[in-house]
Image (cartoon, rainbow, N blue to C red):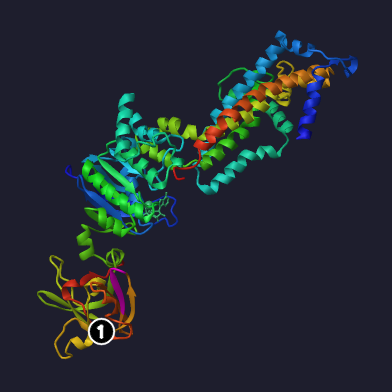
Amino acid sequence: MVFFLLPLAIVLAYSFLQQDIGGGIIWQFTLENYQRLSRGLYLGIIWRSLWLGFLSTAACLLIGYPLAFWIIKQPKRWRNALVLLVIIPFWTNFLVRTYAWIVLLRREGVINILLASVQIIDKPLDLLFTPLAIAIGLIYGYLPFMILPIYSTLERFDFSLVEAAHDLGANDLKTFWRVVFPLTLRGIIAGCLLVFIPSVAAFITPDILGGAKTIMVGNLIQNQFLKSLNWPFGSALSMMLIGMILVPVTAYFWFVDDYLRTTSTKGGRS
Amino acid sequence: MENNAVDLIDISKQFANSARSDSFAVENLNLAIAPGEFFSLLGPSGCGKSTTLRMIAGLETPTRGEIFIYGERMQSRPPYHRPVNMVFQHYALFPHLNVLENVAFGLEMEHLSRSQVRQRAMEMLDLVKLNSLTSRYPRQLSGGQQQRVALARALVKRPRVLLLDEPLGALDLKLRKAMQLELKHMQKQLGITFIYVTHDQEEAMTMSDRIGVMYEGHLLQVGSPFEVYEYPATRFVASFIGESNILSGRVVQQHPNVIDVLVDEHWSLQVSRKGKGEPIPTDRRVSLAIRPEKVFLSSVQENPENSPCPNCCNGTIKEAIYLGTDTCYLIELNPHHQIVVRRQNVHSKGFHAYRPGISVQVVLPPESLCLLEDRDC
Ligand SMILES: Nc1ncnc2c1ncn2[C@@H]1O[C@H](COP(=O)(O)OP(=O)(O)OP(=O)(O)O)[C@@H](O)[C@H]1O
Ligand SMILES: [Mg+2]
């Protein structure tokens, strides 16, 4: 706990200090770093980060949920193999995998060649170094974080409840919304948090796939520490990011999680 | 066919992923169930009862054959469009909904107003005596209460046929007995056709108008509890429903009213010919079944040795087991044959009548012997 809190405390302290030339700090209390945050430029970056984080999370959910559902419906002996397939990308370096996307996305890349060969496009699309490229990179990178918790709630889900709902007159859609969705909501929320948090704070993906054009909060913080050498402002940015994430997460665990846990325990038997 | 509640016509079900690809969970099953009937499917575990029920509900598609409900063809009709409802073996209550919401679930799928839904759900909860627990969640209920919720949830839909898959399986004996009577009463009151799956023969006997006995995917016999008990059609039925002594032999001679059967090539028994059964060819291998309580038992001394007694045999009491209402005797007739006999303990000294070791005479009355053709079951 100390190891977790100590760096955090240092960052918190730094965020109230002043910058010195050449990366040093002046030991004097100030709120200037936080005032600077509210400038339009930074608000824009923050907003863009949240928006991209939201989009990638939504996309991961839309892809991940059906995928998890499909896996659970496969014969038992296939399931573990499929789950393994979901995890395999983690065995290689994140950086390498992200660079691989450059090969796919650039003007003379695989995707453009494919699209051109089936004559959907007549001149190459500018895919690389756009927000779309970042989103694709984020979705690709964090999709397993969505699939795994949803898969694990589905694994505990009692599918005879689906039969009961059908028997009582609910079609597939109603059965999903009234029974499957509420009882897998914990997995959905866990997956969304696990994707949203690293997406918003990401700096490698936007760095590689967004080029210099699209800056996100993660890059901004990285720049403050490593390039501008403005540690206090970087700390203030970090604190704000932590705050933005901490508030909804705490609220969730405080108010919702317990309720979901007690109502979504398996089956009707006690 | 329109007069039947349910018609199953040559139904077979083969599971794609079953261990043996040639094995049927249900095979060539034909059954007609009358409206308002309490019909039980009875059989040991794994014989295909649940599969049959699930095919009627539409949760499983038959590999072959047709299902009609009140004359309507159910082929490719999804479960949510069938006029039947099911009480699941483990209830399958929605854990995130309370009792009232569970019962209202099915009604909300119909085009009813909110107040109608509530009113009908509350009426049903009154009927199953759960009106004080409406806001509890399933996990806060006892097994018996959960069972009532499951029943209410299905009945509130006013199905034309209610399917029940071992609904009392998880309850203790006392609660089971009480619920059996309650279910039977409710069924008569509401006039709904019940198809009831159980592996408990006593339960089936108590509640049913008719029983269908299943074994390894086949329906062996359909009849009233009386018929199934008194005139079992196969060896399996004879031993699964109640107890039976079964003797193997072959037909040696046919008379107008009786058939002579030779058991073990030396013991000749006469069997009354029963009703319509087609004649059994001489020399055919057969089984004879007799209920333990239908065997006469007397001390050897009481019967003069020389009087003619067609189905008599002497034996020795091996064991006497006192069971309260009656006593069960294991009698050795010869080194190859033992027979179980039950005597009601009408006198308080009854138990002492026959002690192990004493010689007795047993009589197997020709009219109590059932002649069963030897088939695989
Ligand atoms: N989904 C399935 N996939 C493969 N085989 C199945 C499936 N469901 C049932 N079976 C097989 O079909 C046969 C009949 O099963 P069923 O569930 O109908 O038996 P049952 O009579 O209800 O038994 P029980 O009293 O134990 O509930 C069994 O051999 C079972 O293994
Ligand atoms: Mg079953």
Ligand 1 neighbours mark 1 (CB distance < 8 Å): no
Q: Quadrant of the N terminus of chain A?
A: top right
Residue at 62% x, 34% y is A145
Q: Front-most of A139 and B243?
A: B243
Residue A63 in sight in this render: yes
**Which residues make up the magenta segment?**
B324-330
| The quarter of the displayed image where residue A85 is located | top right
Picture coordinates of residue B180 (x, y %)? 29, 51
| Residue at the farthest bottom position | B306
Check if residue A157 falls in the magenta segment.
no
Q: In the rendered view, does B165 fall on the left or right side of A59?
A: left
Picture coordinates of residue A143 (x, y %)? 61, 32
Check if residue B325 falls in the magenta segment.
yes
| Residue at the farthest top position | A40
| Residue at the farthest front position | B348
Picture coordinates of residue B48 (x, y %)? 35, 54
Q: Main secondary structure of the magenta part?
A: strand
Q: Which residue is mark 1?
A: B360
